[in-house]
Every structure is written in structure tokens, then in C-alpha cells.
Image (cartoon, rainbow, N blue to C red):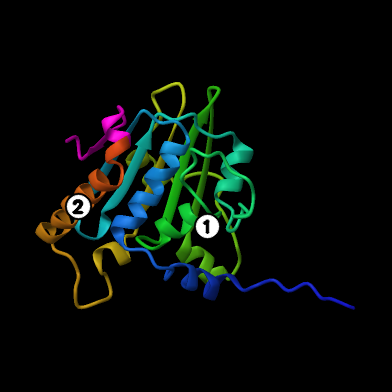
Amino acid sequence: MDTIYTKPSAAPVIQALRSIGYNAQTAISDIVDNSIDAKAEYIHIEFEYDRGNGYIRIEDNGIGMTDDELQRAMTIGSKDSREKRNKEELGRFGIGLKTAAFSMGKRLCIITKKDGIISERCWDLDYVSDQNEWLLYQSIPDEVKAKVGQIEEDSGTIVFIDRLDRFCGFGTHKVLKQESYYSKVRRIQKYLEMVFHIKLENGLLISINET
């Protein structure tokens, strides 16, 4: 039987992926899962309000990724959920990291270090939608490099999410003011303490805004 290759348009697929069943608590939890899978001993999460220029930054001291590993991690649907996985691995599908981030903001930047080698990638959903193509930046844009920062440890990963339209409710009648924003952060903190209580009791450190 004859077949024909079809390539989905990027813009509508991205919008669909942004609507996959996450709330802020489960989205942050899914990203923390990845850090735990990478054998991180500490995970620091920073939530910055800064009106329309806020961001979420998650840094860990896990094993990091090679450039090829980062490319796979940033590719939509890169992991087959049917593959046999390490029994300690908490993540499940090759869309988790991306869709968790996309459910909160329009830009996802990752910098990672493994064996002393640094790799970067960035999804900008505004650019993807404008071009209607799956175009992934191979480096972090200059305007956010200072906020993303650098990895000081021998290995680790920083996940940086900004343009937080859905996290902050931009474009709706429920835009979060600063007090409500940090109330939301406190709810996320309590959720993480509940979900990861066994890991925390066994020595994992998770800090939020230096607390």
C-alpha cells in the first residue's frame, strides 16, 4: 500500500501541546522529575515576578547532558514511552519537559554542562508560530543570557522559562499581581514538598527563592 509523508504544521501543534493537562504545580513537578532523574543532589528554583518580564529558573547539579542528549531532550516526542526505562526514572514521555514549560511560558532556554562541555538550546514559541516551522535555536538569546546565568559546578543543568503568559494569566482578565504571583509560588512549594517528601527525607535539597 502506498504511503505519503506528512509533516504537521508547527503553529497549531504548538498551541495544542500548550494545552495538555498541566497546571503550574504539576508542570514544575515534571521538570523537577528530570533533575532527579539526572541524579541531582540539589535543585534551586527561582521565581521572579518583574511585571511582564518575569521568569522561572530551575538549576540542578545533576550529571548534565551532552549536546546530542540536549538535542534529543529538546526535540518534541523524542522519547518513546514504550521503551524500557530505569526503574528509578520518574519521567515518562518525550514531551514532558517541553510541554511542562510551554504550559507556563512561550520561551524555554536550557544550558547544560557535562564533562566540562557546555551546550545550549532555546525554543521561542513566538518565532515558531511566526515561521510555522520547528525551528530550535542552538544558543540562548543575548537578551536573557544574564538571567539564565552559568553553571558553576562541574556538571548540571539550568532550565529557564520566560514570557510567562499562562503562568501569569496575560491576555486574560485574571492577570496575576505581585502578591498573587508569590502566593502561587508558595502553593507550588507546598505541592513539591508533598510530592517529593520521600526524596527530601533521603537528602534531596530543593530550595525556592533562596529559602
Q: Locate residue 104: give its quadrant.
A: bottom left
> Which residue: 15% across, 53% down?
182
Residue 171 against residue 95 in the figure, above or below? below
Q: Is residue 203 magenta?
A: yes
Mark 2, secondary structure of its residue: helix
Q: Amino acid at mark 2?
A: Val
Q: Quadrant of the C terminus?
A: top left
Report if residue 208 is visible in the image: yes
Q: Is residue 115 magenta?
A: no
Residue 204 against residue 194 in the figure, above or below? above
Q: Locate residue 3: give its quadrant.
A: bottom right
> Which residue: 13% across, 63% down?
177
Looking at this view, is 205 or 67 the one in front?
205
Looking at this view, is 160 or 28 the one in front?
28
> Which residue: 28% across, 75% down?
171
Residue 75 against residue 70 in the figure, above or below? below
Q: Quadrant of the N terminus?
A: bottom right
Residue corresponding to mark 1: 95
- x and y percent of residue 108 in the render? 43, 52
Looking at this view, is 191 or 78 the one in front?
191
Q: CA distance from mark 2 to mark 1?
A: 24 Å
Q: Amino acid at mark 1?
A: Ile
Instruction: From the viewer's perspective, tell me whether residue 80 is left or right of residue 170.
Output: right
Disc ID at residue 185 = 2
Mark nearer the N terminus (2 vs 1): 1
Please report the bounds of the magenta region as a residue range: 199-211
Report if residue 44 is visible in the image: no
- Give neighbour class at mark 1: few <14, some 14-19, many 20+ (Cα, 10 Å): some
- x and y percent of residue 61 in the render? 40, 29
Mark 1, secondary structure of its residue: loop
